[in-house]
Image (cartoon, rainbow, N blue to C red):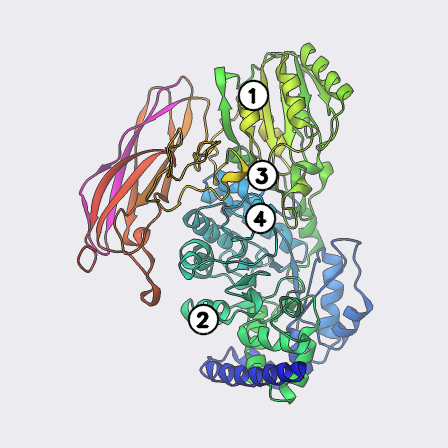
Amino acid sequence: MFSSRFRRAAALALLLTAALTARSLAAEPPASRRVEDLLARMTVEEKVGQLTLLSSDRAVTGPYTSPGVTDLLSKGELGGLFNIYDVAFTRQLQEIAVRRTRLGIPLLFGFDVLHGHRTLFPIPLGQAASFDLDAIRGAERIAATEAAAAGVNWVYAPMLDVTRDPRWGRIAEGAGESPWLGAKIAAARVAGFQGDDLAAPDSVAACAKHFGANGAVEAGRDYTATEISERALRDIYLPPFRAAVAAGIRCVMASFNTYDGVPGIANRHLLTGILRREWDFPGVVVSDFGAIEELTIHGIAADRAAAASRALTAGADIEMQGSAFRELPQLIAQGKVPMAALDAAVRRVLSLKEALGLFDDPFARMNEERERAALTDPAHRQAALDLAEKSLVLLKNDGDVLPFSRDVRRIAVIGPLGDDEADMLGPWPGTGKPEEAVTVAQGLRQLLPEASVDVVPAGTVTATSASEREAAVEAARAADMVVLALGEKGTMSGEAASRTDLRLPGDQLALARAVLAVGKPTAVVLFHGRPLVLTDLAGSAPAILAAWFPGTMGGLAIARTLVGDNEPRGRLPVTFPRAVGQIPIHHDHLPTGRPPTNPPRPYTASYLDEPTSPLFPFGYGLSYTRFSFAAPRLATTTLPSGGKLPVSVDVTNTGKRRGTALVELYVNQPVAEVSRPVAELRGFQHVVLEPGETKTATLTISAEDLAYWHGEGGSKADPGKFRVMTGPDAEHLQTVDFIYEGLGSQP
């Protein structure tokens, strides 16, 4: 009885949804004449085929497709393939689609290109540490060039999930904790991938993922529910996606997880209400792998047919690796899904293919000579070296242990990651080849050919025996300088790589303590895809260099930094906690009525066993010289509506080496309609200084930098008093106040 009632209710819901969807689609503008002509000639099965995206086995087993894929392709009922690359293979499949099917509609070829295709750049979190938008844009231009040269026309990047939980492995794929920085990087990545002309043979369609609050995970685990307010959604998690849409991105991938109880791929509020209606997004929405069929597991659809209906009518266009959309012909015949919804989705897919130039020349990205040249271009490796150098963050350098002297005769590279090519690349390595990666040991040998570089792995990332530690100690005793290469394997970050313990894995801390006890000048180089808990290590290691997973040229970048050929100028795009119990910890938290104290006092927001401050704050990073930052200066203390307020900061190099300072600008609104974060990043500027030199950095603030979500009123700034704060990181700031005049009275 209950089951039949449930099914009747579900059927009624489908009919109501169909009616609402039909009304909402009635005003959608037509596409080009070519697209509308194709749409008019397509059967329902061919239309559904354009919404079908299946995996090839190229990324795993080689150029191969299953019989089911081949059958759909030959019938013209397949819109695209993913996990696919290389010209010979993509050309073979495109030939079938274009020349052996009734309508000759070309295929989309998609691939995950998170931080490079063949040439691997630092992981995205490491790139964010560079605070260099031009370098990030350039990295994606190279990634697009290589991917397109290999026959790819669609990449599942950039990943734009803001997160404050480093237990979540996918923090490695994003830009960290700042929505503002994430938005700036999002626009840079889209520009790099898509170029000036999407139809150009070296451009690819970018796909922002995972819309809309995938980074707000539960307990640091992948694919878990999101329980946040609409305000948090709007102010924290959506700004990078909105920036990507404004930059012209052509695809958005919906998240696996739920928002307000509904998974992203079926969330009409996100996909239609915000993405299409508020932001006027004209592109395609694709599901994540199998996400539409998983709606039945979430409990919001009784079967695949109901899942297909919910996803399509919510605003989804393409089903990645699933068969729920194969139910659409019957649903349309039964009147449970309007034909207008199917046509709208197909229209968007065909329009994307047209924008990519696939109708004019479906083989434009399939030139084997260009493929060979692009994948081995020395300029690409040089760009990877440059960005890797900019991403390195010097966390500690007591006694100026670094840089090492170039006159060193013997260096011991100790630890499981000192000479491991694969782990230089990190998660999502594209088609990068470990044998093309440069390790730390290889980089040191290249730079110091006269020195002896001894490599002592001392076990694995997760286990070191007593005898292996003793061998490491003996190597340290015999060396002039020691490099401890510690951290995570590349597979310990990324998707489905959540961790509850963020200290160094296995016995690495014991190894570090044994080697440090020898007393030789020692630098720890960390490989990681997330903030690690380094409290114990930081208490004993004199020098720590955060290298992330630095990519193909990472080992050379690290070696050049260790010997002083490169100045470390990266800054942390995410907060490093003292203990896992502090998570979530981030610079832009809300104030509390009972602020923490150190030492803790009763009835304050303190810990009994740990300070509330981070081990290393957002924006932090040392140099091989030292800088002093003056207080910010304002030419005027009022910001008119529609105007800009210049903020000037004097920076002096007080050290003995040339260096690059990063001036960071934050804002705070002390009194507003709702409680506002204590500090929000709103600007930064690099300043290159000779020893003893002073320069003035000038940044600007506008009303957009002060805005926040006001419900139905959208995002806007309140008139009234604001604080602008500048300094080297989020914990060491100087303040000046100003008044935003706005359009109304002070709140």
Q: CA gap, disc 3 to disc 2?
A: 40 Å
Residue bearing mark 1: 541
The percent position of residue 317, horizontal first and vertical second, equals: 58, 72
Amino acid type, label 2: Gly
Q: Nearer the viewer, residue 497 or 126?
A: 497
Element type at mark 1: loop
Of pointers 3 and 4, the one earlier in the residue sequence: 4
Question: Which one is in front in this view, the residue at disc 3 or the one at disc 1?
Answer: 1
Residue bearing mark 4: 220
The percent position of residue 195, horizontal first and vertical second, equals: 51, 55
Question: Which one is in front in this view, the residue at disc 3 or the one at disc 4?
Answer: 4
Residue occupying image coordinates x 63% and y 20%: 513
Q: Which residues are magenta?
A: 626-655
Q: CA gap, disc 2 to disc 1?
A: 52 Å
Residue occupying image coordinates x 20% and y 60%: 743
Q: Nearer the viewer, residue 597 or 564?
A: 597
Q: Which mark is residue 625?
A: none
